[in-house]
Amino acid sequence: MPDVRAVIAGRPVVLDGGLGTMLEARGHDLAGALWSAGVLIDAPDDVRDVHAEFVAAGAEVITTASYQLGYDNLGAAGYDQAAVDGLLEASVRLAREAAEGRAWVAASVGPFGAVRADGSEYTGDYGVSVTDLARWHRRRIEVLAAAGPDLLAIETIASPAEVEAIALALEGIDVPAWISVSAASTAFEGGGLASALATAASASGVVAVGANCCPPELIPAVLSHMPAGVAAVVYPNSGERWDAASRTWRGEPGSAFTGVDDWVDAGARLIGGCCRTTPADIAALAARLAGRGHSDAAVATHDRIGG
C-alpha cells in the first residue's frame, strides 16, 4: 500500500458525514446507551446503506460504525468479549462492502467518553489515568487494525491526557491513523490544544491530526495550532450544539463548509462532516473541492492507495 502521506500531500480528500444522523433519518432511535452501536447490532444493512449513500455523494473515506463500541458498555448490555470483537470486525466489513473499491475505509476509534454516553467527550473529565486509558484504547485498536481497514480514525479525543494515552496505544500498530480532537472540549482551553496536536503528530503511524465534532467556526483556530510536517484533518458539525443533559441538538444548522477554501489554504487535507451533516452536504463539499481543481474521482483515489 503506497504511503498515505503521499496521497493527502497532493490534494484534499473528502471524508463522509454524520452516520448517526442518517441512521436517525431512517427511523432508528439513537437515544440509548449504545447509540449507533445498537443499529450495527440490530440493522447492519442500514449501516451499510448509509455508508453507500456517502460514497455515492463523493466521500473518498467512509468511517465505520465502531465509534461507541466498547467492551464495558456492551458488556453491561450482555455481550461478551468475543461478541464485541465480532461487532468491531463487522463494522469494518460492512464499510468495505459499501465502498465497493471506491473509497478508503477508516475504522472509527471513539473516545472513552463515548461509551459513557454522558457527554464527557466534551470535557475529558474521566478520572482515569493515562496508563489505564491507553490500555482501554489498545484493546479495541488491536481488533480494528486486524480487521483490515485502510486507516484508523481516532476521533473526538477529549483531553491532552487522552491524546497522550492514544499515542501510547498506537505503538506497534501497523495501520496508518489520524488523531482528531474534540475542539469543543473544555479540556483544551488555556493553551492545551497546540501541545495536544503536537503529541498526536508524534505518535506512531499518524498521518494527520486535527479536530472534529465542533462548530465550524472553531476550525480556523485548530488549523492555526497545527504542528509542522503533518497533514490536517477537519470535520465539524453542522453548527448545532449537543445538549448532553436533554440529549438533543440545539440551535439552527448552518453551512458546515462555508470556510472550506480557507481551511484548504491553511493546510487541511482530510475534510468532511461530523454530526448533523448529510450526503447532500458531502456532495456539495466534493463539488466545491473539485471546483478548486483538487478533487479527483473517488475510484482514482482508491487506485492510488492500493485498495
Image: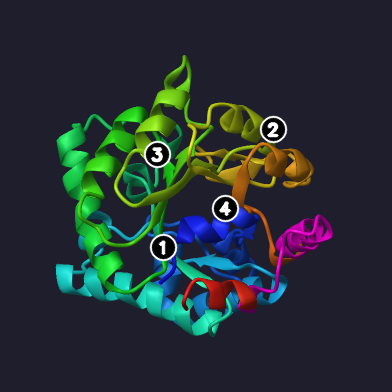
Q: In the displayed structure, would residue 38 be above or below residue 273?
A: below
Residue named by callout 4: 9
- Per the model, the C-alpha gap separating discs 4 and 2 is 24 Å
Dot 2: element = helix
Furthest toward the right, the residue is 291
| Badge 1 or badge 2: first in the primary sequence | 1
- Per the model, the C-alpha gap separating discs 2 and 3 is 23 Å
Q: Which amino acid does label 3 sit on?
A: Ala
Residue at position x 58%, y 79% in the image:
102
- Rendered image: mark on residue 201: 3
Residue 220, position as x, y percentages in the image: 66, 31
| Badge 1 or badge 3: first in the primary sequence | 1
Residue named by callout 1: 151
- Per the model, the C-alpha gap separating discs 3 and 4 is 15 Å
Residue 130, position as x, y percentages in the image: 20, 33
Camera sees residue 60: yes
Q: In the displayed structure, would residue 96 be above or below residue 212?
A: below
- Per the model, the C-alpha gap separating discs 1 and 3 is 15 Å
Residue named by callout 2: 217
Residue at position x 40%, y 68% in the image:
38
Q: Is residue 162 left or right of residue 57?
A: left
| Badge 2 or badge 3: first in the primary sequence | 3
Instruction: Indicate the quadrant containing the N terminus: top left, top right, bottom left or bottom right.
Output: bottom left
The range drawn in magenta is 281-299
| Badge 1 or badge 4: first in the primary sequence | 4
What secondary structure characterizes most of the magenta part? Answer: helix
- Per the model, the C-alpha gap separating discs 1 and 2 is 27 Å
Residue at position x 64%, y 67% in the image:
59
Q: Which amino acid does label 4 sit on?
A: Ala
